[in-house]
Amino acid sequence: MVEDTKIGGPSGKFPVTRWSAVLAARSEDPAERSRALEAIAAAYWKPIYKYIRIRWGKSNEDAKDLTQDFFATLFEKEYLHDFDPAKARLRTFLRICIDRFVANDAKAAKRLKRGGGAEHVALDFDGAEVELSTAQPLLSSSASVELVDDFIEKEFVRSLFGLAVEDLRKFCNSGGKQVHFQLFEIYDLESDGERPASYAELARKFKIAPTDVTNYLAFTRREFRRIALARLREMTTSDDEFRREARAMFGVDPE
Amino acid sequence: MNWLSDEAISRLQLASALPDLGGTRYRLVERVGSGGMGTVYLAEDSILRRRVALKIFDLPDEQGELRARLLREAHVLARLEHPGIVPVHDAGTLADGRVFYAMKFVQGERLDEHVKRLDALSDRLRVFQRICEAVAFAHARGILHRDLKPENIMVGPFGEVLVMDWGVAKILRDAPAANEQEPPQDMGLPRNTAPHADPLKTAHGTILGTPGYMAPEQARGEVDSLDERADIYSLGALLKFLSGSGEPVRTLEGSESAPKAVAAISATAMAKEPSSRYASVSDMAQDVSRYLDGLSVSAYPENVVERAARLAYRYRVAIGLVLAYLVVRTLLLLWFRR
């Protein structure tokens, strides 16, 4: 049996907080607000950037500016104060905000003027462009609201899972569990054509017992789930909203 | 960060959604269904080599609130050893932080589905009587269900009726009866339930229950004052559903609408004021039983015509025989006189 309880604190688990970036964005403390901006932008910038590129047909340069400015305005104008999880999901709220933001030509024209003083976060737009070219999403500029929401939902899950995978990589590396992460990466993240057919094949490749493969994968999946939920928790404002979102994210909606 | 393909996301979603049963005696077979808070899986108990149902909350329980709630439900079930209530075998926490309990795997269908195959009101009322028996037993053990509805009743392949989902049950009396066995300590089950931990009321003040089946006082959030009559209200709504409001029914009298007596039983149980309802589930079940036997019911005072019609229906065979005898006798007399 593999001992998995020596890293990441006394329980060997990824540390989980109950901090909500959405609530922190309403804080009076600038440092707290800045931290909230980073967390929300990290999870949502890619879906929003891709949405602006496809739905609004903007060039990559315009989409970059609009994405940066949108997040700056979101906090500057305190849009999140109006967010009510009982009325809409956060991504629906953000989609409505971005539609208004992009559609408002007057504000768009002022973009450059305002951009100088606004707080921006570093975003990897080149990476997002590569993603757009790798897999063209099924969304056109004339798509229905339902399709648009599905697209943003899917891209949000992709973004959040991507962040969770990165967190997991760092967590495993810091605990000397590189093999755990490599197994997870090969078996769960690679596409079918590239992944080994069986645990036995993986065991041979890494020179470990097949039962270790089972245990290592169980560990990384468990921690991935924990990390992804911690990331999701940051994007929600209450336990009920968190549970609803988590069930949707993992595809376990009530029948 | 590498881009995650749709395929990888689906795989991660599946791997994250499935419970981590490593280190337990259970092996996952398949997902059975989901409810408000958790998912039920079919699993195999590798030690006893039998199939069990695992009810597992979907999310890890950071504050222990869900654990307390699920284990509380397990505790409630452990107190209720009755053929109409699904028995609980085990409870605990999985390696991924999700809490679970194992119970008997019930093969069958929910009442709202099963009722479609029961045309006759009498058959439906017999199912209702079984539900009443289980609820009356729970009341005798000091436990209210508080979420009785067709979706929470299972009917097995041999006609066994099981009342499910005791997640928002209320323990009226903590002290068990003298002959009742306490759950073992090592299950980690809470022995007492503090009033503030009432599962009916969420942290945000939302009242759990089902509109249409929930007693008015429960909907108003009068959690502390609820008693057996809240369940009686729900049973009244269930009876209304069974007697035709849910699925069309064929009554004893051959009509397709609920007989007045049955409607009256339902209406009495669903009275706005708890004091106007039946005092106990047994009283209600007795009225249903009397209706099935062709007797008058306490909830519906008959007039002379209705009483005569009911008696005529009840003794229809005897009356038919007497009438046939009289007709034959009259015909014979007329024949011989001619």
Image (cartoon, helix red, strand yellow):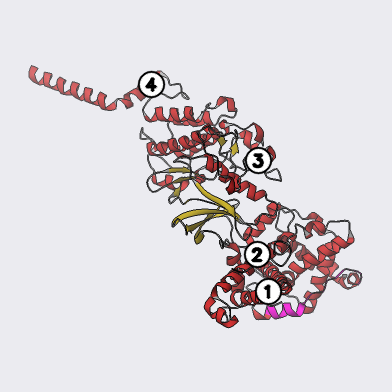
Q: CA distance from mark 2 to mark 1?
A: 17 Å
Marked residue nearer the N-terminal end (3 or 4): 3
Residues tagged by mark 3 and mark 1 found on one chain of the structure: no
Amino acid type, mark 1: Lys
Residues tagged by mark 3 and mark 2 found on one chain of the structure: no
Q: Is residue B311 left or right of residue B221?
A: left
Question: Which portion, as a residue range, is magenta?
Answer: A116-132
Magenta highlight on residue A118: yes
Disc 4 is attached to a residue of which chain? B
Disc 1 is attached to a residue of which chain? A
- Label 1: element kind: loop
- Label 2: element kind: helix
Residues tagged by mark 2 and mark 1 found on one chain of the structure: yes
Give the image location of residue A77, x and y in percent. Answer: 86, 60
Which quadrant is the N terminus of chain A positioned in?
bottom right
Disc 3 is attached to a residue of which chain? B
Amino acid type, mark 2: Arg
Q: Are marks 1 and 4 in contact (CB under 8 Å)?
A: no
Which residue is painted at 54% across and 27% down in the image?
B277
Amino acid type, mark 4: Arg
Q: CA distance from mark 3 to mark 1?
A: 43 Å
Which residue was labeled with disc 4?
A: B307
How crowded pointer 2 is (Cα within 10 Å; few <14, some 14-19, many 20+) is rated as: many
Q: Is residue B40 left or right of residue A222?
A: left
How crowded pointer 3 is (Cα within 10 Å; few <14, some 14-19, many 20+) is rated as: some
Amino acid type, mark 3: Asp
Which residue was labeled with disc 3?
A: B198
Q: Nearer the viewer, mark 1 or mark 4?
A: 1
Which residue was labeled with disc 2?
A: A225
Which residue was labeled with disc 1?
A: A177
